[in-house]
Amino acid sequence: MSKLIETTYEGRYSSNTKTAADTDPIKVDMKFSPVDLLMSSYASCILATVDFYARKKDFEVNGSRSELSYEMSAEGGKVGTINVKLFFDKEDYTAEQKEWMENSAKNLCHVGNSLNPAIVKNYEFTYGA
């Protein structure tokens, strides 16, 4: 089933976006570039995906956060590299839990899996942050 995302361009680099899940429009202006919004979506998806799979394995990752940076490709006009840093507030995750978390972040996020495979993705995981 497809999801409807409705965007109205207001001019002067400003738009409003509505989704079925949220009736309050998301206002986008020059404070955020479209690529910044893509990175925000990717970061949110990674954290939600890690949380989803952690809960399936009966542990939590509350208090986790991310920092993403990106570089445009040499050809221009598209993202070339994404650097993902994930911070988890607990140090005492087991090796198996960390493996689940890292695999979920790298391979199971829907947004990440929708990105062009040519984009280089670098991951860094910090525990006890």
Image (cartoon, rainbow, N blue to C red):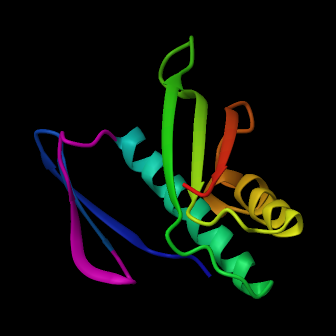
Tell me which residue sits at (10%, 39%) in the image. Answer: 12
Q: Compare residues 125 and 92 and report the one nearer the observer.
A: 92
Q: Position of residue 51 (x, y in %)?
A: 63, 75
Tell me which residue sits at (58%, 71%) in the image. Answer: 48
Q: Position of residue 23 (x, y in %)?
A: 26, 83
Tell me which residue sits at (72%, 77%) in the image. Answer: 54
Q: Compare residues 123 and 8 and report the one nearer the observer.
A: 123
Q: Residue furthest right?
A: 96
Q: Compare residues 64 and 84 and report the one nearer the observer.
A: 64
Q: Position of residue 128 (x, y in %)?
A: 60, 58
In this view, 57 is above or below 19: below
Q: Position of residue 18 (x, y in %)?
A: 29, 72
Q: Is residue 44 magenta?
A: no
In this view, 98 is above or below 12: below
Q: Quadrant of the N terminus?
A: bottom right
> In the shown orientation, is residue 78 left or right of residue 104?
left
Q: Compare residues 69 and 117 and report the one nearer the observer.
A: 69
- Segment tinted magenta in the rendering: 19-33
Tell me which residue sits at (47%, 46%) in the image. Answer: 39
Q: Residue furthest top?
A: 74
Q: Is residue 29 magenta?
A: yes
> In the shown orientation, is residue 108 left or right of residue 95?
left
- Res. 80 image quadrant: top right
Total numbered circles: 0
Q: Quadrant of the C terminus?
A: bottom right
